[in-house]
Amino acid sequence: ISSGDSRLFPVVAKEPISQLFSFDPFKKSYPSHRNNPSYSTTWEKNKSALQLSGSGNNESSTITTTPPTRIQEALAGLTVAFSLLSKAIACSAIVGVNPLVGLWSSVIMGITAPLIGSRAGVISGTAAVVIVPLSALTVTHGVEYMPLCIILSAILQGLFGVFNLAKTADLVSEEVLSGFLNGLGLILLFSQAKVFKAAKAAGALVPAVGMASLCFSIVQLLPLVTKAVPSSLVGLVVATGLGMMLKLPLATLESTAPAGTFSGGLSSLPSLIDFGQLRSMATSSSAVKLVMPAAISIMIIALVETLLAGKVVDDMTGKTDDADYDVPKRSVLAMSTGNLVSAFLGGFGGCGLIPQTVLNLKSGGGGPFSSISYALAMASFVLFFAPLVGKISEAALAGIMITVAYDTVAWSSSFKSIKAVMGKGGDDTRVQRLIDFFALGLSSYICYFGNLAVGIIGGVVAQRGLHSIFNRFSKD
């Protein structure tokens, strides 16, 4: 699993770095980078194309409510924290470190993002898309190279933000973005298969499917009755509680994690890395050469997913507030800072998370406080409520993640592209629509069966290249 890249070009920053930290992170007006005049109009012109709802209805996936209250944001953040628990633990296992490393990495990313000025509504945390290149390094050469790799990646991300390169994400067209979301949604969906395979091996497949289906149904249907509380949180509590009442043989977070993970207490706090070892590695050309490919890969993956998460928020909320600062630049700098802090505390950082961002907005979040609420909730889980959190059913969490996967797939945009190809029009128009549909299909296929980075790069190159060739020959 990895994410993608778009073509980069240098642009000099328009304001000094000192001005990047002079704003109120809790302001009620949430800015949108679509108002930046330096952006092209491609995304704005086609903003209705990307829809993250299964209904295929343009209105259904755009959240047009008033700014969320602090209570709504707190509940949304709590829901997001629950959804990231198993993911953070799984990422830690893949890298080969203590499960708490992933949890604290999410906490740090969740706190630094809104404080520095990341796009309101975007959730940042431990990301599976950056774990694959990192795990390839740690499995082969050892976890001692992890801090240097994350720090180098964070520095590269910071340079990307300082030189104002964030706007290059606008090169990703709506078709390629939809393909990326389709591939990501399918990856999320089938990643939950392991829960049911384990349940089948334990002879508990029927109860696991039943509790996951119950959670999924509550998440989908409860908003039709009331939106006072996040449906995802209600589904998680009801499915887990019912499983415990019926004494169903379901796996829990505690039963599948190493012993002591959910004991809680101050002993679970993160500690600083060995800076002497870091200094010796950083001054070793062989060590830097060893980790640099993974660092560059992580930088590209994290940058694109974070910026695309901001685009998803723009589309789902329809925000058009005027901004007095560059939101994409701040998002990149916030991510860079969070990764640096996380690396200094022994973590592996993360980036903006599209699935959890969707869950945040669907649960009633959307402001900076929802991100901080999620981070504080995650920290509370580790320190104070770890034994209780350990009782959460993995089947219930799978139900939530299946819902997130369903909402992540760009159903409306994909169907719109299919209808466009089948619609009437001249030969020139039909060829252009076929190129766009090919880009969507290509990026979807590569993102799912290959990797997300190659999917986005391939989609952008193929679409722009084919359009360029067509335009040249059509003029002749």
Image (cartoon, rainbow, N blue to C red):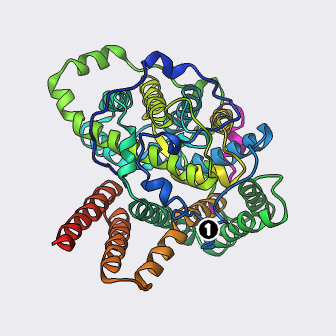
Tell me if residue 296 comes above or below residue 419 in the rendering: above
Amino acid type indicated by mark 1: Asn
Is 405 left or right of 142, judged from the image as shown?
A: right
Specify the quadrant of the image occupied by residue 106. top right
Q: How many marks?
A: 1
The span shown in magenta is 382-395
Q: Secondary structure at mark 1?
A: loop
Tell me if residue 243 comes above or below residue 310 in the rendering: below
Q: Residue at x 37, y 54 (%)?
A: 172
Instruction: Report whether residue 238 is seen.
Output: yes
Is 155 left or right of 74, judged from the image as shown?
A: left
Q: Which residue is mark 1?
A: 58
Is 139 left or right of 50, judged from the image as shown?
A: left
- In this view of the protein, which residue sits in the foreground, 213 or 450? 450
Residue 308 x %, y %: 46, 49
Instruction: Report whether residue 195 is seen.
Output: no
Q: Residue at x 45, y 63 (%)?
A: 178
Residue 295 x %, y %: 29, 36
Residue 337 x %, y %: 45, 26
Neighbourhood count class around disc 1 (C-alpha, 10 Å): few under 14, some 14–19, many 20 upward = some
- In this view of the protein, which residue sits in the foreground, 295 or 96? 295
Q: Residue at x 69, y 48 (%)?
A: 79
Residue 6 x %, y %: 31, 49
Tell me if residue 41 comes above or below residue 405 in the rendering: above
- In this view of the protein, which residue sits in the foreground, 326 or 79? 326
The quarter in which the N terminus is drawn is bottom left
Q: Residue furthest front?
A: 475
